[in-house]
Image (cartoon, rainbow, N blue to C red):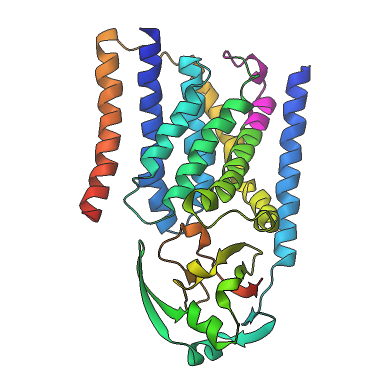
Amino acid sequence: MLSKKEKIISILAISVLLVGVFSSLYVNATQVNKDTITINGNEYTLNQIFSMCTKRFIETDEGEKTGIALYDLILKIGISCPACHNYIIKAEDKYQQTVSWDILKTGILTDYGRVFFPETAHTFWVRNVIEIEVK
Amino acid sequence: MKNMKIFAGMILFGSLWGFSECIIGSTLSDIGAPSGAIMTGFFALTFLVISRIIYRQPGMQLGMGVIAGTLRLFNPFVGCHICSALAIMAEGAIFEILWYKISFDLSELKTITTQVSMGILTSYIVYVGGFTLTQILTPIISGPGFYFENLIAIMPNIFASGLLPALIGGSMLPAIILIKNVDFTIKERLYYPTTIGVSVLCWFIVVGIWFLINI
């Protein structure tokens, strides 16, 4: 016969497993797969982005990374007063991070859709970027 | 004297945890394995539960998390140093809270069902809690600032990511509890040289490699 404490442990274990399973199903069902990146409401392919922006090399603690300069991208798509905004970088799996212009202007977007910022924690290096929202 | 022994044990187990996070965790990450889930479900759970069985000292696992997290800051290999260090420290604290009501003789965990359940529960909450806290604290500590909307957006991912460590933890805890019957007594004169020696070795290897790579 299980004690009250043992029953609670078992019920909680089943509950967290259910939360994990349903969250996994939700994440898979809502994952967005697309070939373009939405920037300030407009769709761009990586080819378009790379053809209009300056290439840049940055040094990170994972070595040298190459991509297009994010400050150049923001200026090229016509954002006025870039320093007046924050930028939410969103991934296909719904992961997202918000950065200010001061951080964004140091970063790059690679040809495999990942952003790198040389002086931030890796938490901000969003993979599989599908949107940059200007706020 | 008892406090000194516990302190030395805390440093030993914290160092072993930090060492495995740096060396084994980084290797797993490099080969594309789910390193975070394996490190929490297997290594963290093992060190936390064994230390609790041996020393029966509340607060010790919190200290182990601080030591392991501090060692993780010196991880010589790539990865998010501050994120991982904060997650490890949080894991130690969360374990401490979760196991607060569990007696030191583990009398509540007699049946295999309860042991599996506790392994699942502990690994899931420790992992998800550590992941969540690092998502809050890393942006605050590293500068850019925390945005609640970002945390809300990734909560489903965080809840989903706890599934694998939960399954690993569920299968690990019954095995870890088996060692309860093993006699860990070592001779008094060997206790401090062993604990301090192993701890120093862990730090020496990790910091040494970090030094060689960065200097």
What type of secondary structure mainly makes up the magenta span? Answer: helix
Q: Position of residue A110 (x, y in %)?
A: 47, 77
- Residue A125 in magenta stretch: no
Left or right: B200 in relation to B87? left
Residue A62 lies left or right of residue B155; in this view the side is left
Is residue B128 among what the camera can see? yes
Can the viewer see residue B184?
no
Please check the rendered image and state whether residue B113 is part of the magenta-colored stretch, yes or no.
Answer: yes
The quadrant in which the C terminus of chain A is found is bottom right
> From the viewer's perspective, is residue A54 above or below residue A93?
below
- Residue A45 position in % (x across, y down): 59, 87
Residue at 75% from the left image edge and 45% from the top image edge: A18
Q: Say above or below: B125 vs B138.
A: above
Labels in figure, total: 0
> Where in the figure is residue A55, as x and y percent of width and height?
41, 84
Viewer-closest of B29 and B139: B139
- Quarter of the figure with residue A93: bottom right
Quarter of the image with the N terminus of chain A in it: top right
The residue segment tinted magenta is: B104-118
Q: Residue at x 60, y 68 (%)?
A: A86
- Position in image of residue B127 (x %, y %): 58, 42
Residue A68 located left or right of residue B77? right
Q: Residue at x 24, y 38 (%)?
A: B204
In the rendered image of this protein, does residue B23 appear above or below residue A4?
Answer: below
